[in-house]
Amino acid sequence: MSGSRPTRFAFVLGTLAILAIPAGVAASYFVGSIDVLPALVVATPVALVLGLAAAAASRKARYNLERTVRRVGERRVRFARLVAWAGVYVGVTGLLALGFYGVLRARS
């Protein structure tokens, strides 16, 4: 199973990317000195970078899988890829939300 390390890496990074924005909101809730907006301004790019790193790792895992004769772990690679791209989507959605918030604040 030569592709198991990139698969695990993609899954862990994708999971962290998905949880980055909720963790930022939770940090602002539990720590009184952190406001929600600055927490999201930090957490959103972190989510995007982690998601892109997870997508790169899932590509490597898929490449390793394609080069093997026995396709052991194909479902794990597919699931890690799904989680990685979900992390990218969470980061992009957060950036779009912050962008629209910035536009709305600039207009008022």
Image: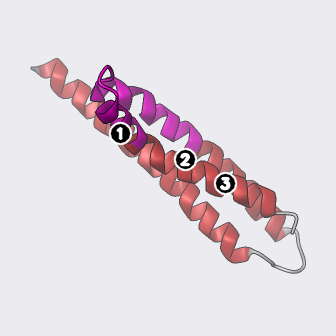
Q: Position of residue 43 (x, y in %)?
A: 44, 33
Mark 1 Cα-neighbour bin, 10 Å: few <14, some 14–19, many ≥20: few
Q: Look at mark 3 in the image and give the residue it sits on.
A: 10
Question: Could you say whether the residue bearing mark 1 is in a helix, strand or loop?
Answer: helix
Give above or below for 18 relative to 45.
Answer: below
Magenta stretch holds residue 43: yes
The quarter holding residue 98 reads: top left
The one of 40 and 28 positioned closer to us in this rendering: 28
Give above or below for 22 relative to 15.
Answer: above
Q: Look at mark 2 in the image and give the residue it sits on.
A: 16
Q: CA distance from mark 2 to mark 3?
A: 10 Å
Magenta stretch, main secondary structure class: helix
* 103 left or right, relative to 107: right
At 23% from the left and 30% from the top, the residue drawn is 101
The one of 19 and 30 positioned closer to us in this rendering: 30
Q: CA distance from mark 2 to mark 1?
A: 14 Å
Mark 2 Cα-neighbour bin, 10 Å: few <14, some 14–19, many ≥20: many
Query: Amino acid under label 1?
Result: Ala
Q: Are marks 1 and 3 in contact (CB under 8 Å)?
A: no
Query: Amino acid under label 3?
Result: Ala
Q: Which residues are magenta?
A: 23-50
At 79% from the left and 63% from the top, the residue drawn is 4
Q: Look at mark 1 in the image and give the residue it sits on.
A: 26
Tag 1 or tag 2, which sits nearer the N-term? 2
Front of the two marks 2 and 1:
1
The quarter holding residue 32 reads: top left
